Amino acid sequence: MSTPPAAGGPSNKNTNAFFLQAGIAFGVALLTMVCAVVYVPVDPWIRAFLALGTLFLVTSSFTLAKCVRDAQENSYVVARLDQARVDRILAEHDPFRAVG
């Protein structure tokens, strides 16, 4: 089980239903495109071009999703580091200490 995010942090926990819906939508879209490429009445070289385009679209979609996820995780880590620095400064601050 994962730990909950810190107070004020983003909550990026998806429900199982959302994950299932996204997986089914991707599967249906890919299956539809594959069937269209297989059954389209065109020359084999056009069919191969469409198949390569579909493959490229699928792989670039996964790459884009990974980049977006990594950017979100990096911004969350930076925000947590900044918050830790502020907490440390506040913990070390003594308002009654003489200056100079």
Image (tube, rainbow, N blue to C red):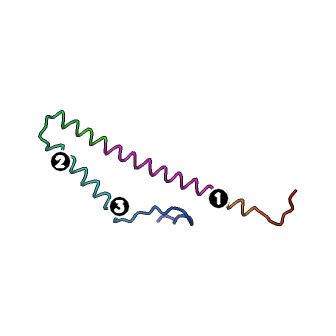
The residue under the point 56% across, 65% down is 8
Q: Which mark is residue 64?
A: none
Amino acid type of the residue tagged 1 in the rendering:
Ala
Query: Horizontal and vertical percent for residue 41?
Result: 11, 40
Is 49 located above or below residue 58 in the figure? Answer: above
**Label pair 3/2, CB-CB below 8 angstroms:** no
Q: Quadrant of residue 90?
A: bottom right
C-alpha distance separating marks 2 and 1: 53 Å
Q: Is residue 71 magenta?
A: yes
The residue under the point 18% across, 38% down is 47
Q: Earlier in the sequence, mark 1 or mark 3?
A: 3
Decide: few, some or many residues near mark 2? Use Cα within 10 Å; few <14, some 14-19, many ≥20. Answer: few
User: Element at badge 3?
Assistant: helix
Amino acid type of the residue tagged 2 in the rendering:
Cys
Q: Earlier in the sequence, mark 3 or mark 2?
A: 3
Decide: few, some or many residues near mark 3? Use Cα within 10 Å; few <14, some 14-19, many ≥20. Answer: few
Amino acid type of the residue tagged 3 in the rendering:
Phe
Q: Which mark is residue 84?
A: 1
Q: Which residue is mark 2?
A: 35
Query: Horizontal and vertical percent for residue 34?
Result: 21, 46
Decide: few, some or many residues near mark 1? Use Cα within 10 Å; few <14, some 14-19, many ≥20. Answer: few
The span shown in magenta is: 57-85
Q: Which residue is mark 3?
A: 19
Q: Quadrant of residue 52?
A: top left
Is 44 located above or below residue 22 in the figure? Answer: above
